[in-house]
Amino acid sequence: MNDQPEASITPEERLLNAAEDTFLTAGVHRVTMDEIAASIGMSKRTVYQIIPGKEQLIRMVLNRFAGRIRNEVEAILDDPDTSFPEKRDRYIASIANNLSKVNTRLLSDLQRFFPGVFREIDTIRARNLPQLMGKLIRQGQQTGYIKEEADPEFISAVFLAAISGLMTQPQMERFGSTPSEIAIRVAQLVFEGIQCTPCESASTSSTPNQKR
């Protein structure tokens, strides 16, 4: 959620903040526009003047949420003073921290009741994950932490396929995992397979000096 002081944000931002808090924790199917409006003392008429319908509101919330994750990860990858192991660990932590805010009910509701929005999430994920993961892998190769023969494009595609395939309600129930836990497990498996030897495990807490 946006941490701006209440007085400094627009009515649209107030509405998006309230909707994000509600959708991420309670899903979208049983939540009404009236409930979201009431939570911030906004009339239903004002809500519909800002955003014409619930599906549009869901799209705006999720696009903003995804954009915030991308900006956060790009800031990590673009930091010239951070070593690759620290970037890798912060990348995984950022993805996991943001996904920890997502209730599994949200994904289930979207897949069942708003399939168009669910497909849009897949499109965003297909655009962002390979670009960011590929960039991180190339940085690891340039600093000697990732094997030179590792193909960033192929590995990023594997990462995307694993995340997309496992982050569905049946699979999360099968493995007893949350979206955050799935992201961590997949990322650790990927990095353990492509790191040079000897290299620290993706789960280690130590950070060696960056190779040049």
Image (tube, grey):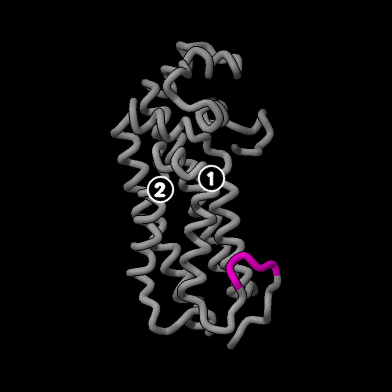
Is residue 188 shown to the viewer in this render?
A: yes
The quadrant in which residue 148 appears is bottom left
Residue at x 46%, y 38% (from the top left corner): 173
Residue extending farthest bottom: 212
Image quarter where the C terminus lies is bottom right
Q: Residues within 10 Å of mark 2 (few under 14, many from 20)?
A: many
Q: Nearer the viewer, residue 148 or 125?
A: 148
On the image, the x and y values in percent for residue 37 come to 53, 16
Q: Residues within 10 Å of mark 1 (few under 14, many from 20)?
A: some
Is residue 12 shown to the viewer in this render?
A: no
- Residue 45 lies left or right of residue 145; in this view the side is left
Q: Nearer the viewer, residue 94 or 200?
A: 200
Q: Which residues are magenta?
A: 201-205
- Please, is residue 190 above or below residue 43 in the view? below
- Please, is residue 191 above or below residue 36 in the view? below
Under mark 1, the amino acid is Leu
The residue indicated by pointer 1 is 99
Residue at x 38%, y 72% (from the top left corner): 152
Residue extending farthest front: 174
Residue 166 shows which numbered tag? 2
Under mark 2, the amino acid is Leu
On the image, the x and y values in percent for residue 209 come to 67, 81
1 vs 2, front mark: 2
Determine the secondary structure under disc 2. helix
Q: Nearer the viewer, residue 165 or 69?
A: 165
Determine the secondary structure under disc 1. helix
Q: Which sits earlier in the primary sequence, circle 1 or circle 2?
A: 1
Image quarter where the N terminus lies is top right
- Tell whether position 210 is magenta: no
Q: How many marks?
A: 2
On the image, the x and y values in percent for residue 80 come to 60, 74
Q: Main secondary structure of the magenta part?
A: loop
